[in-house]
Amino acid sequence: MDRHIFLALTTSSQWMLFLAIILIIFSWIEQKKRILQAGLLLFFLVGTLSLWIILGKLISVPDVLPQGKIPTEAKTLTYFYGLVLTGILGLASFLLEWRQSKWTKPVNIALIGIAVVLFFMVYHLQQQS
C-alpha cells in the first residue's frame, strides 16, 4: 500500500477519533447533552468510514508474510475493525442516551476506553511504517 494513502486513512480517522473523545469528555465536564450526542455521532461516522475502507478493500494485506512477521496492513485492518466496533458502540450509546437509559454512562466509559487504545494503536502503526 502506498504510504501516502496509508497516512491519509489513518491520520484522518485518528483525528476524528481524537475529536470524538474530546467532545464526550467535554460533555461530561460541562453537562451538555448536545456535545455528547455530537461525539457519539462522530464515533458512528468514523465507524461508517472504517466500514467503507474495509469493504472497499482500500487496504490489501500481502499473501506472503516475510519471516513470520505480521504486516502493517494486517495491523491496520485490525485498527479499522476496532473503529467499526466504536461506531456500533457510539450508535448504541446514542440510542441509550435518547431513551435516557441508566446504561448510557457505562457504555460511554467503555467506548472511551476502547477509543483511547485505538488512538495509541494507530499512533504506533504510523511510527512503524
Image (tube, rainbow, N blue to C red):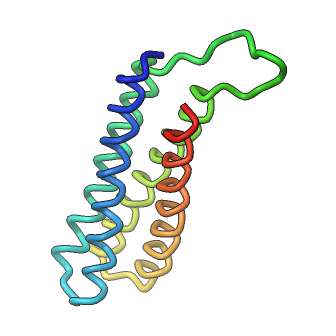
Which residue is the extreme one toward the top? 64
- The one nearer the camera, 94 or 6, is 6
Q: Which of 52 and 77 lies nearest the eye of the viewer? A: 77
Give the x, y percent position of residue 102. 43, 86
Quarter residue 95 falls in: bottom left
* Count of picture labels: 0
Image spot of residue 126 (x, y percent): 49, 39
Q: Residue furthest right?
A: 67
- Write the residue at 58% across / 36% down: 128
Rendering quarter of residue 30: bottom left
How far across and down, in percent of the image, does residue 88 sit?
A: 43, 53
Depth check: 38 or 9 in front? 9
Residue 60, above or below 88: above
The image shows residue 106 at horizontal and vertical percentages of 50, 79
Q: Nearer the viewer, residue 78 or 18?
A: 18
Q: Residue at x 38, y 60 (%)?
A: 90
Task: Identify the image quadrant of residue 89.
Answer: bottom left
Position above or below: 77 against 37: above
Residue at 83%, 19% in the rendered image? 67
